[in-house]
Image (cartoon, grey):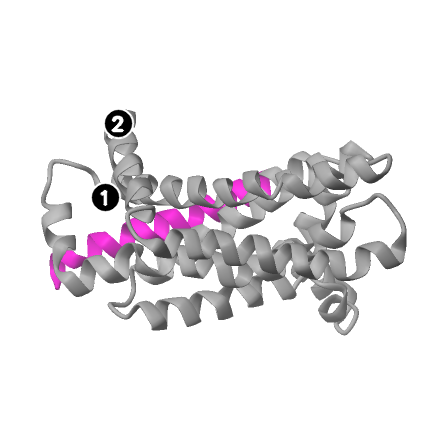
Amino acid sequence: MRWQTIKAILKKEFVTYFNSPIAYIFIGVFLVVSMWLFFQDFFLLGQATIRGYLSLLPWIFLFLTPAITMRLWSEEKRSGTIEVLLTLPVKDSEVVMGKFLSSLAFLGVNLLLSLTLPITVAIMGPLDIGPVIGGYLGALFLGAAYLSLGLYISSLTRNQIVAFLLAIVASFIFFIIGSNMVVDSVSLWLAKILSFIGLGSHFANIAKGVLDSRDVIYYVTFIAFFLFLNTRSLSSRHWK
């Protein structure tokens, strides 16, 4: 893959987000909702910690990331511009990677703006920085996994709403299957498999402030797998 081509697609897609008020609405809703939910219990606990906020992020991402990815392929298919885009002298994998990185950059902007929260908490009391770094790093990995899944689903339909709803359902399934609620209700051997497959269990590990190579490898593999499926779904257009 050629980085210059990926960079050009990344820049084009990223700028497109901010060419409409939708991006600012996404950012505003994300910040307002997440901080409102967090501060509901923060003052009752009386502790300088953002653990409650970090536990909310996976659930907020279930709706935010599909909203980010739903138009990336669906809109291209609906408007017919996908054929023009893919007849240019670029590889399918380069287009997929460019769109994925642009969506990840947009998600990164949301997380960057939310740093005002740990800064505020740190002013109020001594804040343990380890879990904060781990939590944000875990959120970035989890968000990237959600985005790769949502991007693939968006390539399967022309309808943005369908892409949005399917991405929510698929992301929820991958997140919840590794949770204690599911793991504790099955046999031991199946529990180990589900715990490994589940996105949530790996996020919980990183959010503790301990970066395990197994969690990183899992996320990288998950992301690469769905980006590969995305590329294959585009390649299938040749026989249609």
Residue 160, position as x, y percentages in the image: 31, 67
Residue 147 placement, left or right of 194: left
The residue tagged with tag 1: helix, strand or loop? helix
Q: Split into 4 quadrants, where in the image is the N terminus? A: top left
Main SS class of the magenta portion in the image:
helix
Camera sees residue 198: no
> Residue 105 has which mark?
none
Percent coordinates x, y for residue 235 in the rendering: 21, 52
Mark 1 is surrounded, within 10 Å at the Cα level, by few (under 14), some (14 to 19) or many (20 or more) other residues, namely many
**Alpha carbon distance from label 1 to label 2:** 11 Å
- Residue underneath mark 1: 92
> What residue span does the magenta drawing correspond to?
217-240
The answer to whether residue 26 is above or below residue 129 is below
Which residue is rendered at x = 44% and y = 65% of the image? 167
Which residue has dot 2 on it? 2
* Residue 232 placement (x, y as % from top left): 28, 52
Q: Amino acid at mark 1?
A: Asp
Q: Is residue 230 left or right of residue 35?
A: left
Callout 2: helix, strand or loop?
Answer: loop
